[in-house]
Image (cartoon, helix red, strand yellow):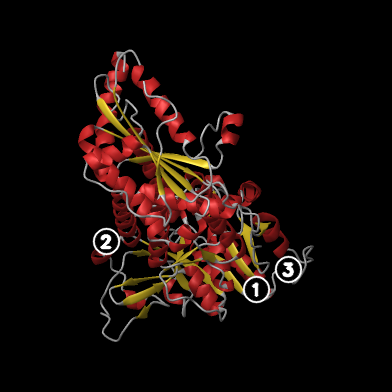
């Protein structure tokens, strides 16, 4: 290592290398356990909402199979054009409530199924008393009209004089519900003229990021249940209302998604003796009256639009409840199981040293599958299968495990950033295990090589070069049926390294009959080299000669094990004997290349 930058880098990377030597493949198991526990806690504690919301938003903006808006829902829009057209006669907004009364009468004559207001008539107009009285009478006499209430901060409930028992449609959850319980609520000024479930809350509860994705079905307050405006409309029309407090909205696309009629021309036509519009234009329709005009400030950010008119959001809530196609979500336990299963499979792949290219390909395929499944479910079903958490957990594991595996491999290879094994003056012991799969068919060769690689992954010091000379086509072709496994250690770790090697071979063949049967053409050569790293580089020449000799010892027919006498002597020195792996003679061969 030379230069201050490299020295600084080494101070940072060497501890990682030492850690990898101490932990070995146990790190992969520990990492899986830690991530599984962390993500399981996050899922069950509800801390993965950010991931889920981003996935939901992205799919809602980009899905290709968007459900059509219900044709029986029509919006009457107080748009900017209507505000301008009505201003000369009725002045600025708000208009006299007689205008709304005449609109309701006209729609009711056509037999509208429901007339729903997205306008809060909270206070009487002291300057238009007759208009207010007129609207009150029309509202009382038209049972198909529905009006919104606005739920205020619950902290203000004790300060309110409005009793829950006085609000039409608010129902006690049990007979013991306190009759004197009050609620902070903005209600229509003609509250006493309404009956049944014609009042409902029209609050829009956004998520923490300010985006509206859900619509509430009901809220329970001090033993009383207050239904939302969409829930009461659907219930009045004979539809089923779910028992859950909120629904995840199944958007009908970007606004405008519903059939929309401008307020001013419709109102003008309803007042004519001879109408130009169809007489049954709104027969059986759910007519939602509100505004998309920016000047009236009823715009909210949603998953499909930054400025989504509240009128369209209300219509979407009604549409979802009416047709029962709001989105449902899987229990968190399902995602915990999927996440743990994915982490377990990844851990097994890294622990058993599966082929990294295969692992990477399968990982990419599975991760892509998570995204595709999540996307397709929101296009073809009403179930939100959110696999972003398993995706994120897998990505985190793969990144950390790959980084650790790189550090582990580099240390075992003596890389100066992660190991001091090849520092000048250090004495090194190298064990070579060369395997040649001559005479073995391709499928068996791959299985035996994979078994050796798996067992190598369980060793403490072993490294592999399973594709020799891959950048040199000629040499690679000459040795394409050979693989090299090696152990680079200091003299103090020679005995553990020999035990590593023997354990790997024994587990591969002696304990796995199939691999043993399929190794009929296998030739194993065991060699060793000891050298001291010198500044002149003589140790490299010595190592190259021993490596070339090891490759030369795997010619001929198998099965057989060929031993370098130096390796035999080293084993005796360390008090180790070669385990009986094959029922064939074991040969000792002198090096073909004389030592330096």
Work out whether residue 222 or residue 139 is closer to the camera in this orientation and state it. Answer: 222
Q: Is residue 190 visible?
A: yes
Whether tag 3 and tag 1 are in contact, CB under 8 A, the answer is no
Quadrant of the drawing holding the N terminus: top left
Q: Could you tell me how far apart the alpha carbons at marks 1 and 2 are, in whole angstroms?
A: 38 Å
Q: In the picture, residue 188 is in which quadrant? A: bottom left
Work out whether residue 355 or residue 509 is closer to the camera in this orientation and state it. Answer: 509
Work out whether residue 87 or residue 562 is closer to the camera in this orientation and state it. Answer: 562
The number of callouts visible is 3
Q: Which mark sits nearer the N-terminus, 3 or 2?
A: 2
Whether tag 1 and tag 2 are in contact, CB under 8 A, the answer is no
Which residue is under mark 1? 112
Q: Is residue 98 visible?
A: no
Q: Is residue 258 left or right of residue 569?
A: right
Where's residue 324, x and y in %?
A: 56, 73
Can you say whether 565 is above or below 146 in the image?
above
Q: Residue at x 25, y 79 (%)?
A: 178
Which residue is under mark 2? 156
Where's residue 177, x and y in %?
A: 28, 81
Q: Which mark sits nearer the N-terminus, 3 or 1?
A: 1
Where's residue 478, x and y in %?
A: 58, 35
Please tell me whether mark 2 sits on a helix, a strand or a loop.
Answer: helix
Q: Residue at x 39, y 73 (%)?
A: 226
Q: Residue at x 44, y 29 (%)?
A: 592
Residue 44: mark in rendering: none
Please tell me whether mark 1 sits on a helix, a strand or a loop.
Answer: loop
Q: Which mark sits nearer the N-terminus, 1 or 2?
A: 1
Q: Is residue 462 left or right of residue 382?
A: left
Can you say whether 477 is above or below 203 in the image?
above
Q: Is residue 108 left or right of residue 193?
A: right
Which residue is under mark 3? 281
Q: Could you tell me how far apart the alpha carbons at marks 3 and 2 are, in whole angstroms?
A: 44 Å
């Amino acid at each position: 290592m030379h230069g201050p930058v490299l020295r600084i880098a080494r101070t940072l990377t060497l501890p990682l290398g030492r850690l990898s030597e101490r932990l070995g493949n146990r790190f992969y198991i520990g990492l899986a356990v830690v991530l599984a526990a962390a993500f399981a806690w996050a899922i069950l504690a509800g801390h993965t909402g950010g991931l889920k919301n981003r996935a939901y938003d992205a799919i809602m903006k980009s899905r290709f199979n968007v459900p059509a808006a219900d044709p029986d829902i029509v919006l009457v829009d107080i748009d900017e054009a209507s505000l301008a057209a009505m201003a000369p006669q009725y002045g600025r907004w708000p208009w006299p409530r007689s205008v709304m009364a005449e609109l309701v009468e006209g729609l009711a004559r056509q037999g509208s199924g429901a007339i729903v207001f997205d306008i809060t008539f909270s206070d009487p107009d002291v300057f238009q008393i007759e208009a207010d009285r007129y609207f009150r009478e029309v509202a009382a006499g038209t049972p198909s009209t529905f009006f919104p209430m606005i739920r205020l901060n619950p902290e203000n409930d004790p300060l309110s004089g409005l009793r829950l028992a006085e609000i039409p449609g608010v129902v006690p959850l049990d007979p013991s519900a306190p009759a004197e319980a009050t609620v902070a609520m903005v209600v229509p000024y003609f509250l006493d003229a309404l009956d049944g479930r014609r009042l409902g809350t029209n609050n829009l509860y956004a998520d923490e990021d300010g985006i509206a994705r859900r619509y509430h079905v009901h809220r329970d307050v001090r033993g009383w249940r207050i239904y939302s405006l969409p829930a009461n409309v659907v219930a009045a029309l004979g539809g089923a209302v779910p028992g859950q407090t909120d629904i995840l909205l199944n958007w009908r696309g970007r606004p405008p998604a519903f059939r929309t009629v401008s307020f001013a021309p419709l109102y003008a036509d309803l007042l004519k003796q001879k109408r130009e519009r169809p007489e049954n234009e709104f027969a059986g329709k759910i007519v939602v009256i509100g505004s998309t005009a920016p000047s009236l400030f009823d715009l909210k950010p949603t998953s499909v639009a930054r400025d989504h008119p509240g009128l369209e959001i209300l219509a979407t809530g009604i549409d979802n409840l009416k047709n029962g196609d709001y989105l449902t979500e899987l229990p968190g336990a399902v995602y915990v199981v999927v996440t743990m299963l994915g982490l377990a499979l990844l851990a097994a792949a890294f622990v058993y040293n599966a082929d990294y290219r295969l692992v990477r390909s399968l990982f990419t395929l599975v991760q892509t599958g998570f995204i595709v499944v999540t996307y397709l479910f929101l296009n073809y079903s009403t179930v939100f299968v959110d696999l972003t958490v398993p995706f994120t957990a897998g990505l985190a594991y793969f990144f950390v495990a790959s980084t650790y595996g790189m550090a582990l491999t580099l240390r075992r290879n003596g890389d100066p950033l992660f190991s001091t094994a090849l520092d000048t003056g250090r004495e090194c012991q190298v064990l070579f295990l060369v395997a040649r799969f001559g005479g073995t068919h391709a499928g068996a060769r791959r299985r035996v090589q994979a078994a050796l690689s798996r067992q190598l992954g369980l060793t403490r010091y072993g490294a592999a070069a399973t594709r020799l000379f891959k950048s040199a086509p000629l040499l690679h072709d000459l040795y394409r049926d050979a693989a090299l496994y090696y152990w680079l250690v200091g003299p103090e770790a020679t005995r553990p390294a020999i035990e590593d090697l023997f354990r790997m071979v024994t587990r591969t063949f002696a304990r796995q009959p199939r691999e043993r049967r399929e190794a009929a053409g296998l030739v194993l050569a065991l060699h060793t080299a000891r050298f001291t790293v010198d500044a002149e580089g003589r140790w490299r020449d010595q190592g190259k000669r021993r490596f070339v000799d090891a490759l030369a010892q795997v010619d001929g027919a198998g099965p057989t094990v060929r031993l370098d006498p130096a390796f035999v002597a080293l084993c005796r020195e360390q008090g180790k004997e070669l385990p009986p792996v094959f029922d064939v003679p074991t040969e000792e061969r002198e090096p073909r290349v004389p030592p330096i």
